[in-house]
């Protein structure tokens, strides 16, 4: 393993240099600020002795990547490691400390992380949470071995680990992606300069432990590799369930490797992961999407697993007790498994029911239930001399409980012991892993570490994993861990989730851009020629809003058809409500979903009455405001990355009587965002309404920092509460005469739009219907109460997007509420990119530009990212006042 040292030169013209100390392959890599140009030069040394590290330089064991935080670019280097052993002669390391070195600023150079809590330290390093997270001891790497691949896949891979790694399990891919991308453009000789030094490393997160042990008196070797997926990563209550790409939370591939004979290796792989059906989140199980809406994601998840592991056997440990929230989740899991039509088998085993008290003896019942499946799947055996598979594991066990931690760990322990004992039996070795304390300890350590990553504490029931017994002391230890989890989940998980998102590139503008003139030119040319590899097709969308004044749809049994029916059968229905519950002081501080669910059932019944089948995609609620989206079953599989966000504006953001709900999603390669808002009431409160709009527009943020403004198509709907600035009798007179144009000139929202004070850039279709507020309930008469409120167009729909065409804008004559519902239809052009055509064009442009280097010079005079044309004879001396080596 090569070591490296880092020197920092210059002030404003800062240069960070990385030197390889391996005499057999020395080189120098420099990183410059702002455009972050990198130049790597192969160097030949005149001596073969150890290179003297200059005073003040920083020794490191590799580079994890680069990240941008608060407009500063940082190089992340590995400062300290712990060797956890070796595997097939390859060293394995745990990362114990990292450092973030600013590429374009000197102000963080002297910040000490040994005194983060020191009040005298005025400067707080912007990377301190990232440094803490990556120094936690849960990240591993090997300079010469691909930890992302299990043994079976490794026998079939060829090439350098940067070309063969399993994308699911690399945790620094985002911060290293610019380096990986440029490496792919290098000639083979140039790649070797970088690859042989192992300067850039791929890190996994999870657990790695290797140990020597004796089986039947003979020396053997045991290793456990747990690879946590980075695809839907996060903390327990922030990330659960499944995303639309089929990635599930807390997904871990655990591989047990055993070597008893010198030329053969045993490998067994087992999985854990969140229930891959309904999206759930929060402290309580909250099902946010329907079974039909998440079936495509479910199918994608298992398609990926079958491609990776052949067949899959599910072991579902959720509670089956009637009325239990886990039972609802388990039933949905069963239905989706039956619907998917794939080679999946399933065993439901209510862990809490079977494992009552302190006895776990009934694990044998589960092993009997899955014995046939285990015998069919078997395990892998590899010939180490030829690197060939003598036996291949044909399938995988996928174990889950609610969070795939404690119950899952106990069951996986029993399964792995069973498989290992079966292997020993077939090899006629008179021994059992069931009785081996080393195995129990290593597996308990594995469960504790995976639990710490996800919840902040060790695993419950780990006492049983270590000893095979449930004791009073173990129960007390579990109670202590549960209390610690409550604290961590409520007070530290949010900031930790942000750190994870920065590491994985989920936060906008967190990636460092490495300027490359060729790639930059290709990117510009691809944008200019988008029509060559993309097409557009229409999506019809029905948008509707109604303030129902706290009424239920069953009060007057009024049909919703005048509001929702459409002969064109739109692809999507987007429906918003306000005052779905009465806005009493008690309701304002909480959300009651019962009426929302009642309205959603009534809407689905109305939509499906004409024979077309619609299903609920998702819905959200903020006290009285709610937003739901229904889609045709035929298009549901193409809706991805569906998210719900809310922003309160009532009582200065503390209460939910006013505010907005947003739902965003991607449909093919176009992004959509719909916002249902209920703004401040009161005829004269125009400025407050404008502020409410700005608060929602700026403050409603989806996962990974996505804001409303970044979407291709944005539609606002709701009770915006803007009024008409005329007296009541003058207003009614204009309404009776049908003089809506004069009325509209006095409309507050119309005037605010003209002045740019609210909804800047948004368009509203022509209003040719009467004001929708305020009516006497159950009538078509404007307010006759003592207050005699002035009629107004409080209920509106506005839109923004280059490819949106509004086809209709009207109201429906329903009498349930004191508002009339409003509806609008849109035809939206959706972008569909042909990825293969785009890649072919990219390759053509790359070949063309590489063959015309003279043309590249016309584009930019920047130095190339990596230059091997002028090798130097010796590493440069450290710079001084009189000599700067980079000039």
Image: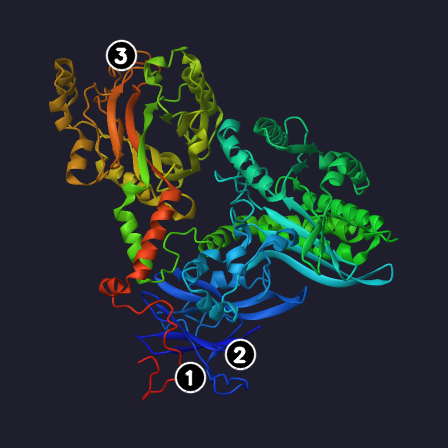
- Which quarter of the rendering shows the C terminus? bottom left
> Where does label 2 land, which residue?
24
Mark nearest the camera among 1 and 3 is: 1
Q: Quick one: SS at disc 2?
A: loop
**On screen, 266 above or below 349?**
below
Mark nearest the camera among 2 and 3 is: 2
Q: Tell me: 223 left or right of 122.
A: right
What is the spatial separation of the Cα atoms under label 1 and label 3, in whole angstroms? 91 Å
> Where does label 1 land, which residue?
873
- Residue 135 image offset from top left, x and y in percent: 55, 64
Q: Which badge, 1 or 3, is on the more N-terminal residue? A: 3
Which one is nearer the viewer's eye here, 546 or 242?
A: 242
**On screen, 416 above or below 194?**
above
**On screen, 562 above or below 396?**
above
- Which quarter of the rendering shows the N terminus? bottom right
Which one is nearer the viewer's eye here, 679 or 795?
A: 795
Which one is nearer the viewer's eye here, 771 or 398?
A: 398
Q: Residue furthest right?
A: 430
What is the spatial separation of the Cα atoms under label 2 and label 3, in whole angstroms? 89 Å
Q: Which badge, 2 or 3, is on the more N-terminal residue? A: 2
The answer to which image quadrant residue 640 occupies is: top left
Q: Which badge, 2 or 1, is on the more N-terminal residue? A: 2
- Residue 585 image offset from top left, x and y in percent: 42, 31
The answer to which image quadrant residue 140 occupies is: bottom right
């Amino acid at each position: 393993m090569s070591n490296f040292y880092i020197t920092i030169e210059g002030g404003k013209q800062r240069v960070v240099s990385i030197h390889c100390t391996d005499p057999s392959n020395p080189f120098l890599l420099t990183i410059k600020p702002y455009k972050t140009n990198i130049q790597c030069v192969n160097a030949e040394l005149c001596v073969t002795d150890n290179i003297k590290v200059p005073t003040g330089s920083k020794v490191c064991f590799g580079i994890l990547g680069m990240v941008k935080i608060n407009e500063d670019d940082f190089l992340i280097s590995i400062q300290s490691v712990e060797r956890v052993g070796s595997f097939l002669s390859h060293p394995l390391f745990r990362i114990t400390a990292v450092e973030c070195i600013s590429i374009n600023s000197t102000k963080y150079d002297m910040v000490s992380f040994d005194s983060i809590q020191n009040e005298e330290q005025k400067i707080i390093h912007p990377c301190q949470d990232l440094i803490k997270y990556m120094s936690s001891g849960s990240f591993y790497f090997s300079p010469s071995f691909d930890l992302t691949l299990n043994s079976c896949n490794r026998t079939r891979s060829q090439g350098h680990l940067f070309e063969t790694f399993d994308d699911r399990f690399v945790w620094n891919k985002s911060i290293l992606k610019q380096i990986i991308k440029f490496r792919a453009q290098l000639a083979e000789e140039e790649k070797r300069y970088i690859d042989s030094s192992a300067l850039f490393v791929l890190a996994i997160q999870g657990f790695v432990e290797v140990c020597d042990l004796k089986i039947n008196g003979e020396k053997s070797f045991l290793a456990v590799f747990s690879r946590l997926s980075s695809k839907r990563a996060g903390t327990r209550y922030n990330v659960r369930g499944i995303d639309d790409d089929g990635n599930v939370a807390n997904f871990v591939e655990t591989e047990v490797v055993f070597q008893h004979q010198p030329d053969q290796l045993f490998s067994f792989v087992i999985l854990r992961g969140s229930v891959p059906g309904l999206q759930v989140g929060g402290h309580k199980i909250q099902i946010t999407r329907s079974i039909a809406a998440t079936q495509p994601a479910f199918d994608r998840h298992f398609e990926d697993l079958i491609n990776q592991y052949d067949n899959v056997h599910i072991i579902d440990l959720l509670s089956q007790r009637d009325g239990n929230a886990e039972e609802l989740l388990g039933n949905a899991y069963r239905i989706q498994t039956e619907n998917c039509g794939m080679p999946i088998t399933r065993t439901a085993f209510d862990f809490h029911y079977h494992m009552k008290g302190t006895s776990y003896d009934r694990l044998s019942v589960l092993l009997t239930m899955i014995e046939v499946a285990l015998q069919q799947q078997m395990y892998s055996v590899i010939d180490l001399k030829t690197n060939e598979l003598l036996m291949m594991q044909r399938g995988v066990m996928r174990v889950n409980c609610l969070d795939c931690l404690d119950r899952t760990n106990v069951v996986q322990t029993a399964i792995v012991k069973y498989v290992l004992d079966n292997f020993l039996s077939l090899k006629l070795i008179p021994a059992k892993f069931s009785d081996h304390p080393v195995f129990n300890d290593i597996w308990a350590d594995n469960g504790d570490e995976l639990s710490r990553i996800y919840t902040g504490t060790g695993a419950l029931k780990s006492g049983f994993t270590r000893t095979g017994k449930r004791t009073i002391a173990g129960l007390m230890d579990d109670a202590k861990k549960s209390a610690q989890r409550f604290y961590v989940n409520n007070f530290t998980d949010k900031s930790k989730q942000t750190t994870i998102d920065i590491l994985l590139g989920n936060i906008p503008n967190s990636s460092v851009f490495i300027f490359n003139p060729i790639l930059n030119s290709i990117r510009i040319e691809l944008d200019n020629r988008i029509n060559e590899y993309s097409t557009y097709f229409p999506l019809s969308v029905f948008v509707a809003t109604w303030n129902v004044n706290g009424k239920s749809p069953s009060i007057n049994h009024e049909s919703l058809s005048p509001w929702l029916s459409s002969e064109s059968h739109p692809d999507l229905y987007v429906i918003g409500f306000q005052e779905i519950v009465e806005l009493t002081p008690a309701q304002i501080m909480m959300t009651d979903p019962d009426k929302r669910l009642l309205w959603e059932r009534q809407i689905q019944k109305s939509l499906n009455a004409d024979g077309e089948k619609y299903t609920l995609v998702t819905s959200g609620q903020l006290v009285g405001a709610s937003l739901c989206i229904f889609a045709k079953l035929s298009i549901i599989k193409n809706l991805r990355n569906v998210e719900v966000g809310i922003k309160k504006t009532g009582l200065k953001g503390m209460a939910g009587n006013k505010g907005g709900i947003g739902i965003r999603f991607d449909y093919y390669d176009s992004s959509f965002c719909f916002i249902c808002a209920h703004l401040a009431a009161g005829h004269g409160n125009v400025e407050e309404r404008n502020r409410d709009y700005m608060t929602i527009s700026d403050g409603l943020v989806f996962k990974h920092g996505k804001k409303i403004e970044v979407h291709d198509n944005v539609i606002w709907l709701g009770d915006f509460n803007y009024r008409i600035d005329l007296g009541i009798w003058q207003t009614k007179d204009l309404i009776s005469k049908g003089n809506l144009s004069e009325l509209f000139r006095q409309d507050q929202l119309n005037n605010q739009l003209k002045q740019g004070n609210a909804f800047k850039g948004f368009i509203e279709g022509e209003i040719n219907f009467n004001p929708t507020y305020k009516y006497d309930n159950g009538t078509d008469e404007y307010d006759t109460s003592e207050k005699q409120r002035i009629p107004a167009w409080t209920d509106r729909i506005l839109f923004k997007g280059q490819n949106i065409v509004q086809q209709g804008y009207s109201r429906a004559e329903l009498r349930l509420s004191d508002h009339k519902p409003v509806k609008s239809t849109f035809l939206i052009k959706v972008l569909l990119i042909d990825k293969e055509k785009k890649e072919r064009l990219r390759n053509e442009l790359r070949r063309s530009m590489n063959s015309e280097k003279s043309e590249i010079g016309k584009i930019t005079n920047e130095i190339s990212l990596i230059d091997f044309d002028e090798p130097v004879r010796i590493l440069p001396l450290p710079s001084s006042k009189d000599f700067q080596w980079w000039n």
